[in-house]
Image (spheres, rainbow, N blue to C red):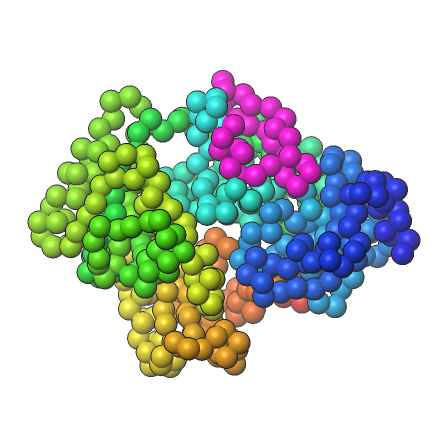
Amino acid sequence: MEVIAQLQAALGAKAVLTDAADKAAFETDWRRIHSHAALCVVFPETTEQVAAAMRIAAAAGVQLVPQGGNTGLVAGAVPVAGHPQIILNLRRMNKIRALDATGDTITVEAGVTLQTVQEEAAKAGRLFPVSLAAEGTAQIGGVISTNAGGIQVLAYGSMRAQVLGLEVVLADGRVWDGLRVLRKDNTGFDLKQFFIGAEGTLGIITAAVLRLHPAVSAHATAMVGVPSIEAALDVFKAMQAKAGSSLTACEFITADAMALGLAHSPTSRLPFSAENYVLVEISAHSAGEAVEDMLLAGLEPLLENATASDAVVAQSERERADLWRIREALSDGELAAGGSVKHDISVPIGDIPAMVRATEALIEAKFPGFRLNIFGHIGDGNLHINVRPPAGKSLADISDYKAAITAAVEGLAMLHAGSFSAEHGIGQMRIVGMSAHKSAVELDLMRSIKQALDPHARLSPGKMLPGL
């Protein structure tokens, strides 16, 4: 095929995969739900090679799918059916271009993993705060393109808040160099914002300038047992009142979710059982900040008035890591147990208990026997409300119910003035939600931006916007 020969000439034969067996891992999403063949998978090493691949694909009338670590949960980085597509994987673009400890910035290429950015920041005595279970695999280009969140959004914001500048290859092959380190630049449209969270539909991010933060000097971490979601919210409010901006994480985990995480992390143990759990962490950013005193001062009245049924405070970094290992194992544990119909919703923080109660009542009334698996970031209003098949059934057995379950759960989130996708994005698995929950004006504005930046729909077909 001529387009493949041209790509091999521009990038090198070894940078273009065409064999079906070699391509398979890149064509299948993390949840192993979507798998569609690509014409080839290409691995550019430079921005100019990305631009060359874009121009070659455009001239051939072939669409292109940018791909990072392929750890997303909405199949945004793999092909859709019915479109000849090239997967453009950025993993070879993995250079740290610069680190400025004075200006607190790091400039990295899109294929650098999130964990590598964290480690490079730490070497310089700084913190890069975005943290995900998939951080060892997730690449910065994908993390920016999906505006990923993670466990510390309540203190630092999502990925959008960390980006100062971008380098982007546009749909026509031009390169926009927006790698600015400035905190202030009031000169018209903030162009980088068009590409953050756009999931590769408007351009291909090839490099980024990221904001760094002061290093954390100490952590105080506790797992707290609570009898209800209402009590969990009370734990958050109490900890926030004691710690303020030093509260960097507050995670809610039901007993069922905890059991899945423990099963997938067999070396982990919890010293108590509870109906629900809250994992809280307070972080010190300056010497002498008594974070453990804050934590204990917050926990004591909660235990006394039975808001909390039990608590364990990590006494070492190893114990802290053990607690977080369970939290990070929740999604993998759920997948290993057969998977679920997943939902990534957010509501105003005060509405979290009402949302959980309404969901419990909904599943019991309309889908009896189905099992709820609820966990997430209570401190920023983001819950993962996942519905597992009845015992003894598989996801395939409940395929006829999936659309109705998702419509019902998303509908409840919208009734609470929430979002049907808080941090996972849209990809090809939340398109129905976009049609159902976005207003005609919102969709029209987004289509206008797509038309302006990618008028021939060359990038990420079948993603984000209905009908494109």
Verify whether residue 97 appears in magenta.
yes
Asked whether, in this view, residue 199 is left or right of residue 239, the answer is: right
Query: Which of the 4 image quarters holds residue 230?
Result: bottom left
Q: Residue furthest front?
A: 267
Q: Residue at x 25, y 59 (%)?
A: 276
Q: Residue at x 56, y 52 (%)?
A: 71
Q: Residue furthest left?
A: 304
Residue 65 visible in the shown view: yes
Q: Position of residue 339 (x, y in %)?
A: 47, 66
Asked whether, in this view, residue 208 is left or right of residue 403, the answer is: right
> Image height check: is 169 above or below 289?
below
Query: Which of the 4 image quarters holds residue 129?
Result: top left
Q: Residue at x 25, y 26 (%)?
A: 289
> Image height check: is 6 above or below 97?
below
The residue segment tinted magenta is 91-120
Q: Position of residue 152 (x, y in %)?
A: 39, 42
Quarter containing the C terminus: bottom right
Quarter containing the N terminus: bottom right
Q: Residue at x 50, y 55 (%)?
A: 424
> Image height check: is 3 above or below 211?
below
Asked whether, in this view, residue 378 is left or right of residue 129, the answer is: left
